[in-house]
Amino acid sequence: MVKMFVDQIAMTVFGTIVTIATSGNDDLLLVASLFSIVFYLVVLYTVGWDIGARDKIKIDGGRMREMPAKGFLIALGANSINILLALLIGLGILINTEWAGNISMVCNAIARLIQGMYLGVIKLAEDALFVDAVIQDVWWWFLITPIPAIVTGGLSYYMGSKNKRISEIFGIKLKNNTRK
């Protein structure tokens, strides 16, 4: 969980820099933001697959029982801060008081800081919706953004625990680089 969250922080720096660098051109911003998101999911995939592969050794040795949902739970835990921030933003808007609005604005700023890889897509969505009050109209985007990470974490763990590689799904055969 910690490794996935640390990777998220690293990717948010990357995503934020890419968003800032390409913010002048909407097409380039979209491509760069999608690249940041895919790169983030690939990093999460490798972490989840490695955890699943380590657990496979324990499962095969009888030291651990099989837990197919473990990857989803790990990824859910790693994204719990994102989900909590999204809920606090939404509650702040629904309660509609000054103090709740302030909490909502602070949580929105923090969510944008730790989810930098999604900033370009969120900015383009806000622009497309002609949103004046950003927080009030698109706060639910922050509930959606953890879903790809949770699904990727769950599927990658499962594939690692079954010793299946994503390259096999696409029919790519990797050379065995073992030395004799």
Image: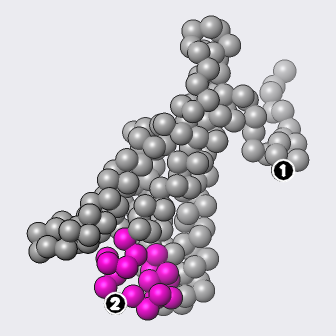
Q: Which of 143 and 179 is in front in this view?
A: 143
Q: Which residue lies furthest to the left in this view?
A: 99
Q: Which residue lies furthest to the front in this view?
A: 95
Percent of width and height locating residue 124: 50, 83
Any mark on residue 132, and which? Answer: 2
Q: Residue at x 59, y 15 (%)?
A: 65
> Is there any visible trace of residue 47 in the rendered image?
no
Disc 1 marks a residue whose amino acid type is: Phe
Q: Residue at x 34, y 90 (%)?
A: 132
Q: Which of marks 2 and 1 is in front?
A: 2
Disc 2 marks a residue whose amino acid type is: Asp
- Residue numbers of the magenta segment: 122-139
**Callout 2: few (<14), some (14-19), or many (20+) C-alpha neighbours within 10 Å?**
few
**Callout 1: few (<14), some (14-19), or many (20+) C-alpha neighbours within 10 Å?**
few
- Quadrant in which the C terminus is drawn: top right
- Quadrant in which the N terminus is drawn: top left
Q: Left or right: 164 with respect to 44? A: right
Q: Is residue 123 above or below residue 169?
A: below
Q: Residue at x 81, y 25 (%)?
A: 179
CA distance separating discs 2 and 1: 43 Å
Q: Residue at x 31, y 85 (%)?
A: 133
Q: Left or right: 96 with respect to 44? A: left
> What element does badge 2 sit on?
loop
Q: In this view, does 152 lie above or below 61?
A: below
Percent of width and height locating residue 34: 59, 70
Majority secondary structure of magenta residues: helix
Any mark on residue 170, and which? Answer: 1
Q: Quarter of the image holding residue 99?
A: bottom left
Percent of width and height locating residue 84: 32, 53
